Image (cartoon, grey):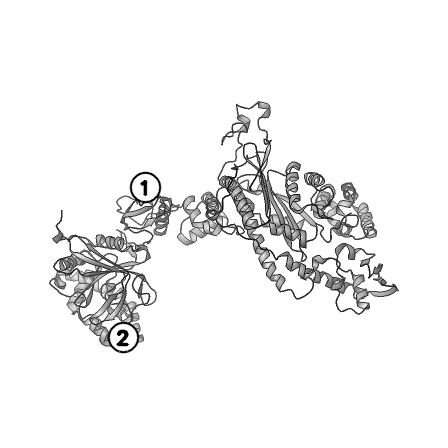
Amino acid sequence: MSSSEDKPRLYLCSGGKWAAGVDGLDYVEPTVRKGVRLKINSTFKHLVNYCCWKCEIDRSSGQVHICYKHEGQLFQITDDEDVSVFLQYANGLEDPPEVYVDVYVSGEGDGAGTSNTINEEPMYLDTESQIQQSHETSYRADFGYGLSDSYPEVVPETQQDQQQEVQEEEDEDEDEDEDEDERRKFFGCAEDEAHVLDMGLSDEEDEENEEDEENEEGVEPSRLRPGLDDYFGIPPLIPTPDVSTEDSEGVPYRRSQRLSIGKVFDTKEKLILEVGMKFIEEQFEYKTKKSCTKRYEIACARDHCKWSMKAKAYGGGGMFMVTDLVDVHKCSRTQLNPNHRHANQRLLGNFFKTKFRNSRRVLTPKDMAEDFREQYGVTIPYATAWRARWKAITLIRGSHAESFTRLPMYLYNLERANPGTITSIRTDSSGRFAECFVALGVAIHTFLQNLRPVLIIDAAHLKGEYLGTMFLVVAMDGNNNIVPVALGVGRSETADEWTWFLNKLKTCIGEPRGLVFMSDRAASINAAITAIFPNAHHALCCRHLVMNVRSRAPRIKKFKTPYWKACKAYTTRVFDRMMNLLQTVVPEGAQLMQEVGVERWSRAHFPGQRFNIMTSNSAESINALSKCARKLPIVGLMEYFREFQQEWYFLRRRKGEELNHQLTEWAQKKIHKRIVKSATWTAHGIGYDKWEVRDYGYNAEVDMHHRNCTCLKWQVSGLPCGHAITVAKRLGKNDVFYLVTQPYYMAELYKATYHGVIRPVGPAETWHYPQNPIPTVHPPLIIRDQLEDRKSTNVVHLVVKVVHSRSVLEYGHISSQCPWIPSSARGSSQLEPIGTVDLN
């Protein structure tokens, strides 16, 4: 045991500022000031680690500098010999000396450094006399030990070797000397002034010090004495060593500052990730010597290298602190790491996770591997990049299985954040997910009050770990923009699931007068609409119909014009003419169109009012928009739809405020086309408010009082036809907006459409929990007979898709091989009785 006489007392000061004082620089306003004792035989490494730990300094933020004052001069501590000199000096004092501990970050340009804990801006010396005074005194002042004792002379073996070394240095630094002369001329420093700035050392002493400085590892010789750097504003005697170092073969490498003794990590996982990134940056590999809940020890993977790190559990709660670190490699640098062992899916997933916050951004595994190779020079196999992509998505959005468990709480908080929102979950008797429904309160109110009573419904397959189907209902606003109304997720497009989904939709909107549904020819949709909305009209998408016709009559592709004219015709006269043409050129296609029922796809024969909506392209557009989102867990999918609806409402609300006309932009463009088309038509009076308009092809009769025309375009679309516009022109009207018969195209109604706001749910940590516990929802069973998209059959899957046993309900149990159920029932995809989760 060492006695107290062998432990000099010191005052550690950090976080202060350097300011000019009476006898030189003073260290003022330190934020940390602590009294300590150090052993007389302490090393430089022990001193640095102890000071950083005591002053709570993060070594990764910069270079640690330790100095002290003696007789008004600052003395830098850079090695073991400096520590020994200082401790012997401090041991002979009655009052403990002050030691100043600072962190400097290397700057650019002139090489000046900035301190994180001392000065945000370096202090500049005011007068030339102060510069000379600070440099004329040796920074290795002799107070009992002397320069010769601190720095013994290093002499080459022979005079010939010495001359050879000098000659090589002169040849290599010839260009640097010319640059130095130019720099002195630029800043006004003459050659004779350089002797003044050389701290008053003689030529022999300066040569000896230069030879000693070359032996110092990792520190540039020019940094050990201030030289010209002090002239540019760096505080005197505070050198900034370069962070690069060299290994045993003399190959320099850039040392990462991610680890330091005393640094604390929240979890062991974060420590391992930080170590992995450090070794990737430095192009080394490590091996694990010990890993448990209390300790984590690693070393360099190459033999005969002393790099090592030790960390221990700290403070409870899973935190780990680095307790020992030998951060210098002595191994060979000639070995290659073509596939870095630490560039695994866990590390890469954490590295790329921030780039997956935006679900609409497509980042392929190939892009990930290329970005990582360009940044760190490490090659990643495609399979590793693919798994890392799923890992990153899981870190941001959660796993698929956990997402079903979180779904009830998410929907509960969605209802709290957005009043009027209606959600519902359907499960089987074992609590496994079967189907869900979500309709935001703002969207429900928007459709009932401000939109045309036409709903476009469609479905799309999910592409994630759990197979299923996404149900979607959208409408169109007065500017012909898409407005999502409801969203759902289920197993497949069966009549039962569509019936449950539309039944929930009916609880939201009721059955408005003149309601029209638009969809494809799916029999399940038709059956569900007939059962739930018996008074509504069901229109077919004309684009889906022509695709079906092409399967029987490929020649319809050459006669698209008469087909679309037959679909969009307002009068039966035009419809019959086009159908007669199709029956002549494509009889098989015309027959199929007749079998489907012309009243379901033709506007002229449709019993309801479908306005200008002839296809379900709006729903297909949302499906295309959510292509990447349909790979996310179910909560991520729901949140994705909420996010882009929130953005759409915000942008369209601002756009509505800029409207300076009574009509929306889309309605203005539509009317303008009709004005141009009817420019040469003439109007002739018949009687009171009745006119005949001659358009050189079809003479129409217009009733301005009842707002109708025999062409039916005015009544069906709600916008004035060319005949009505011609009459308005004859009457001397300056604008025809007053002829619009439907309020859906008015600017005021468009502004009211997006008056409401959609609010975020917030992170899971801030969610509210209901007083009555919500039943737990388990992940659904994965149905084997639902195949994925053909484009994804060659990809690497993170989770193998298996079918769970319906009887045992254990993961990995295959129903076709289950011994506890009858052979006749094996492989059945039927769910058990369905129940509903009450979120209130």
Quarter of image, res 519: top right
Q: Is residue 382 left or right of residue 662?
A: left
The residue sitting at 77% across, 60% down in the picture is 720
Question: In the image, what residue type sits under mark 2?
Answer: Asp
Q: Is residue 696 left or right of residue 356?
A: right
How far across and down, in percent of the image, does residue 559 sit? 75, 49
Image height of 368 relative to 668, above or below: above
How far across and down, in percent of the image, does residue 827 sit? 57, 28
Which one is in front, 28 or 345? 28
The residue sitting at 43% across, 48% down in the picture is 350
The residue sitting at 63% across, 46% down in the picture is 472
Q: Residues within 10 Å of mark 1 (few under 14, many from 20)?
A: few
Q: Residues within 10 Å of mark 2 (few under 14, many from 20)?
A: few
- Quick one: which residue is furthest to the right in this view? 686
Which residue is labeled 2 in the image? Answer: 126
Total numbered circles:
2
Which one is in front, 443 or 480? 443
Q: Is residue 157 visible?
A: no
How far across and down, in percent of the image, does residue 549 sit? 73, 43
Image height of 299 relative to 692, above or below: above
Among numbered discs 1 and 2, the one appearing first in the sequence = 2
Give how far apart the Cα atoms at labels 1 and 2 are: 55 Å
State the mark number for residue 288.
1
Q: Is residue 265 left or right of residue 503?
A: left
Q: Judging from the image, what secondary structure is the residue with disc 2 in?
A: loop
| Front position among marks 1 and 2 | 2
- The image quadrant where one finds the C terminus is top right
- Quick one: which residue is furthest to the front in this view? 771
Q: Judging from the image, what secondary structure is the residue with disc 1 in?
A: strand
Q: Is residue 413 visible?
A: yes
Q: Is residue 834 left or right of residue 561?
A: left
Question: In the image, what residue type sits under mark 1?
Answer: Thr
